[in-house]
Image: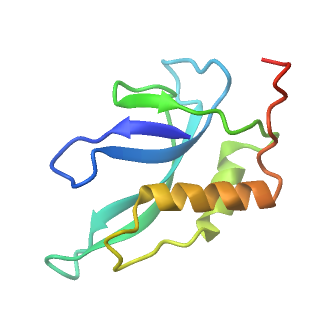
């Protein structure tokens, strides 16, 4: 799970996403999957925005990255996990729902489907 500093005048100062990344990602290559919900303007309505799911292959670390939390290890690819997480609900028209709620739901789905295996505290 990753916490990012937001840019721009949004009401929330942080963005939360899931990363599927190698243990020591190469900063110069796109070897990490960024899985998240983002709030984008809906072109059909001048003032309404809608939540969209996005799975992108990106560089593992950026200057906006504030914190990482290891949730577990997986044998599945980022692309495969990204496809599974398309099923996580995106709640529309609820101002209290944010990317954080999407991440928590995605973690529940990943745990239920045994996508994430908890790390052994004795191994690093």
How many marks are shown on the rendered structure? Answer: 0
Query: Where the N terminus falls, by quadrant?
Result: top right
Residue in view at x 60 percent, y 62 percent: 105
Asked whether, in this view, residue 43 is left or right of residue 84, the answer is left
Query: Vertically, is 42 above or below 31?
Result: below
Residue in view at x 47 percent, y 29 percent: 67
Query: Vertically, is 11 above or below 50?
Result: above
Query: Vertically, is 30 above or below 39?
Result: above
Asked whether, in this view, residue 93 is left or right of residue 20, the answer is left
Residue 90 appears in the rendering:
yes
Asked whether, in this view, residue 105 is left or right of residue 28, the answer is right
Quick one: 89 or 71, which is closer to the camera? 71
Q: Position of residue 93 (x, y in %)?
A: 34, 80
Q: Position of residue 10 (x, y in %)?
A: 21, 53
Quick one: 94 or 24, which is closer to the camera? 94
Quick one: 68 or 48, which is closer to the camera? 68
Quadrant in the picture for residue 24: top right
Residue in view at x 19 percent, y 81 percent: 45
Residue 37 appears in the rendering:
no
Query: Where the C terminus falls, by quadrant?
Result: top right
Residue in view at x 82 percent, y 42 percent: 117
Q: Position of residue 49 (x, y in %)?
A: 27, 72
Query: Vertically, is 67 above or below 90?
Result: above
Give the colouring mode of the picture: rainbow
Q: Position of residue 70 (x, y in %)?
A: 65, 33
Asked whether, in this view, residue 123 is left or right of residue 11, the answer is right
């Amino acid at each position: 799970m990753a916490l990012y500093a937001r840019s721009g005048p949004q009401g929330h100062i942080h963005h939360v996403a899931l990363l599927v990344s190698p243990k020591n990602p190469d900063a110069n290559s796109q070897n990490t999957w960024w899985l998240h919900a983002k709030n984008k303007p809906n072109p059909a309505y001048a003032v309404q925005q809608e939540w969209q799911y996005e799975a992108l292959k990106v560089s593992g670390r950026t200057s906006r990255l504030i914190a990482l939390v290891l949730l577990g290890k997986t044998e599945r690819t980022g692309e495969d996990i990204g496809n599974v997480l398309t099923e996580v609900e995106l709640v529309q028209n609820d101002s209290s729902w944010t990317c954080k709620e999407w991440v928590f739901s995605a973690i529940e789905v990943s745990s239920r489907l045994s996508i994430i295996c908890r790390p052994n505290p004795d191994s690093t």
